[in-house]
Image: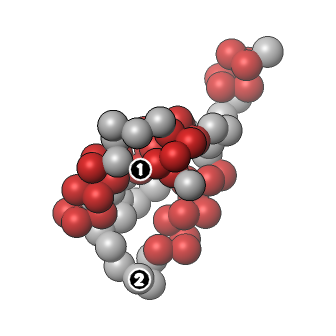
Amino acid sequence: MAVMKHLKKPSIDIKKFDGSSLEYYRFCRQIDAHCDSDGERMNLLEHFTVGEPHKFVTGLSHLEAILSYN
């Protein structure tokens, strides 16, 4: 069942986030819309951030996803 749900997900078309306060909420909504777990969210955040936001996210990668995302 989980495999079917994963296969039915639309392809991800998210613009990389560079820390712009004007893009923050849109970016968060896009990440949340494509994820079912905090682990998925953290993976997408690592992939779709650049610059300072990326440094921040990767700095949290040693934590469990439930702690680092929330």
**65 vs 3, nearest the viewer:** 65
- At a point 34% along the width and 41% down the height, the residue shown is 61
Looking at the image, is 20 positioned above or below residue 32?
below
x, y percent for residue 3:
68, 16
Q: Dot 1: what SS? A: helix
Image spot of residue 56 (x, y percent): 29, 58
Q: Amino acid at mark 1?
A: Leu
Quarter of the figure with residue 11: top right
Q: Which mark is residue 21?
A: 2
Q: Nearer the viewer, residue 37 or 68?
A: 68
Instruction: Check disc 1 and report the residue beneath it.
Output: 45
Q: Quadrant of the N terminus?
A: top right
| Relative horizontal placement of residue 23, taking residue 49 as reference (left or right) | right
| Amino acid on which the number 2 mark rests in the picture | Ser
Residue drawn where x is 22% and y is 56% of the image: 55
Task: Give the mark, 1 or 2, whose residue is nearer the N terminus.
Answer: 2
Label 1, label 2: how far apart the Cα atoms are: 16 Å
The answer to whether one can see residue 12 in this image is: no
Q: Which mark is residue 68?
A: none
Kindly state the secondary structure of the residue where label 2 is placed. loop
Q: Nearer the viewer, residue 25 or 57?
A: 57
In this view, 41 is above or below 23: above
Give the class, few, some or many, for how many residues have Cα within 10 Å of label 1's Cα (few <14, many ≥20): many
On-image quarter of the C terminus: bottom right
Residue 47 or residue 39, whichever sits in front: 39
Residue 30 in the image: x percent, y percent?
57, 58
> Quick check: 30 above or below 46?
below
Q: Quadrant of residue 37?
A: top right
Q: Write the residue at 30% across / 63% down.
A: 53
